[in-house]
Amino acid sequence: ATTVRLADYRRPAFLIPEVVLDIDLQSEDEARVAATLSVQRNPDGASSSSLVLDLDEVSVESVAIDGKLLPPERWQADGRYLTVQDVPASFRLDTVSRIHPRQNTKLMGIYTSSTGFFSLCEAEGFRRITPFLDRPDVMARYTVTLHADRERYPVLLANGNCVAQGEEGGARHWARWVDPFPKPSYLFAVVAARLDRSQDSFRTRSGRNVLLQFFVEPGKLDQGVFALESLKHAMKWDEDTYGLEVDLDEYNIVAVGDFNAGAMENKGLNIFNTKLVLARSDISTDWDFNFIDRTVAHEYFHNWTGNRVTCRDWFQLALKEGLTVFREQQYAGDRYSRAVARIQAVRNLRTGQFPEDAGPMAHPVRPSAYQQVSNFYTSTVYQKGAELVRMMHTLVGPAKFRQAMDLYFREHDGQAVTTDALVAAVEEASGEDLSQFRLWYEQSGTARLSVRDQYDETSQTYVLTVTQSCPPTPGQPTKKPMHMPLTVGLLTPDGRELPLRLEGEKTGRGGSAVLSLRQETEVFRFIDVPVPPVPSLGRNFSAPVIIGYPYDDQALQLLLGYDSDAFNRWEAGQRLAMDLLLRGVADRRAGRPVQFPDYLAEAFGRVLADAQKDPAFAAEALTLPAEIIIAERLEEIDPQAVHEVRFAMRRFLAERLHGAFRSAYDLFATPGPYSPDAESSGRRALRNLCLAFLMDLGEAETRSLCVAQLAGATNMTDAMAALAALASCDCPERRPALDGFYAKWKDEPLVVDKWLSTEALSRLPGTVARVRELSRHPAFTLKNPNKVYALVGSFGVNQVNFHAADGSGYALMVELALALDPINPQVASRMVRNLERYKRYEPARRELMRAALQTIAAHPGLSRETGEVVGKALA
Ligand code: HT7
Ligand code: ZN
């Protein structure tokens, strides 16, 4: 396997400032692509007599320089490159190529979906359309002419503005689009399809009117209303928060049901997976609405962070993704509950990124090597990347951070840069020395902070000692200490917040202090501390680390009840539950009875009693740590033990708080028409959480309540909550509920996905067989990524059934992944990642998982994408 290394980066030998494309979509099976590239030798690049263009599944028919056809001996096209020999310093290159959209099941480049032709080019898909220097530091102005059948594909779109269109001989038409902004090829997009269109407009703060258009499969325009509203919110938010205006005359959003990613920020022509853009209350949950709002905003924010300032190479992916996820998180915090948004982001990090960072695919936020860049669209790049930006924001404060962003855009607009450009801008604007902070981009692994304290009554001094460490990760046996903010507060034993003052400092720090950690061990001496305090550590999750401190249950209950930092109130509840869950797993594995103390029920009962103040927060606080997060804390993972102990804790709480859960279920009903706003979705979240706890007891009365909720639901949030609870309940109501749901929604693909996912996530025995059966169901196809993610992806995170002790879950994953690999290797390699952490499991499962990986590795013709994952896992 070829490894691409950051250390080998060289500036391109040639630049291509202008691209003119003529794409003739002759049939679903074939398109002719004529490309005219203005090519110039790059004065800053290596000198080369040949031009080597990237290429993938494109048949090149002819090559001409400055209008003269080249003889075959002057150019060669192998599977990966088009090499043109003896080229001048500056010239026009014309190529004519053929591509096969319907055969393109990889869904990279131009491919077909039910309504027509669509494209996805990030990261390396443009080379599947035409030979090109398909790397982000080659930026060009594009003019694109599309030709297609008028009746079948009435909508013809590309980036930028439509400058001309017309009819052609027969039943065909054409349109020409010009994008005035130079862009990297990964931002290129085209669409030729039968779509309905709705339009709106946005008036920028400088008074320009921008046309907003939404395109979707015929009959589904009503499902785009929410996304268009989100887009306008996002545009306004970016003006208000960062002073950034939309720079286009026309901003188009297209929805497509077959898509490898969630969405793509192509300049002026965002293409969205239907799952992340279509919303209507009867078919979308509160979670969908929230995710759609954030994704629409995220793609829009890329217009500046990614498109105007782009990445020099794919090792710099976090430059655009980390920063844009951070901006998206800020947006969500402003628009919904700040605390809940932060809690959800941290839960995401802990379920996705922490395990990744502790496994064979662990890599720095700025990786230094890859085989397939598509395997590096990871939680580390996205979520941990956002945490790095957040830490800089915390270290320098919001005002300086804003100045840094202004500077970043001033200095780098129109450029392709490295992650260092952002750090340097923060450094320059704030005066803070971030040289050590840069290690965050280079070192993989989740750092640990071990915190110890000492209170001295006579001097009224409280000393916090913080020691950082980071476990070894592939290729990085040792780590250097990193610079990070640790936000802390101190609480009195009766829950009051103490004013903070550090020894040697003239002024106090208020109730919260941002401590700067740099050395391996740092000591902070707080003075004028009248009582032994309880520390609130890592407020608002100030750094993406694991904080170890010997809290006792009383301290945790105090923090849960009184910490002024909502995140740490939640965190205290999680720690309280986690300590008991870990004890429970140890007891179960040692054959001792698993029991839980009264104080757990009392603490959760107080949260529930207080839920009126903030139901969304209460729902988060009453959610037990996910199985995968518990597993992460164990030396050796026994998924069955983790599942059973967590389930036992849920049943314990459901029994003890039965009355309170039942009353809250009634109390938090949301009367009136559905709205996905933060308050009503918070009430629904809490009410449905109560239902789920009660359903774990499986009583007939609760089952009837659940069936009634499913039957009477006026929105998908309530319907799905009831269905999911029934799907994990071994009761007579279960099968009719699941079958009835499918029968009702079989014509709505996105709801069918919810059904597939609910079946695959069931905790009940028999799920492996059911998933196998569903993989042969007419509603399922390996060709559609959404279907794969819904069924196979959900099954892969089902901790109890995927990890069935007999290995049947692994065998099923192998079967499906190998069937998928030749169709869509990007998606297949994501599925295979569910097996990669086999070394973390107890011996029997470890062996079964290793054998599953070996079967995949030995499969003839395995894709490079899946090959990289299994190769690293087995290394
Ligand atoms: N930049 C887009 C994500 C994306 C992607 C993810 C995984 C595999 C291939 C991909 N191509 C594009 C959307 C975004 O992050 O905003
Ligand atoms: Zn993004």
Image (cartoon, rainbow, N blue to C red):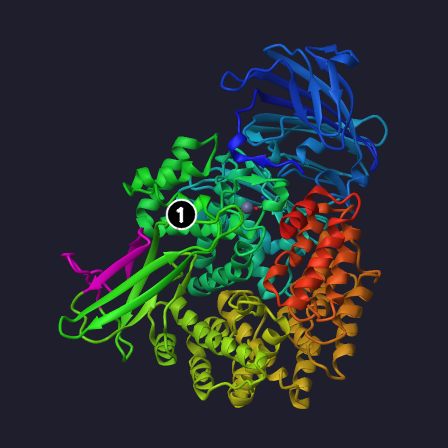
- Name the side, left or right, on which 24 lies relative to 243: right
> Residue beneath label 1, please?
240
The residue sitting at 76% across, 67% down in the picture is 808
* x and y, in percent, of residue 33 in the image: 75, 26
Q: Residues within 10 Å of mark 1 (few under 14, many from 20)?
A: few
Q: Which residues are magenta?
A: 499-526
- Name the side, left or right, on which 135 lies relative to 322: right
The residue sitting at 55% across, 77% down in the picture is 585
- Name the side, left or right, on which 237 lies relative to 75: left
Mark 1 CB within 8 Å of ligand 2: no
Asked if the magenta segment contains residue 525, the reply would be: yes
**Looking at the magenta stretch, what is its main secondary structure?**
loop
* x and y, in percent, of residue 548 in the image: 39, 66
Q: Is residue 443 visible?
A: yes
Task: Give, as a three-letter code, the residue at label 1.
Answer: Asp
- Name the side, left or right, on which 441 lies relative to 770: left
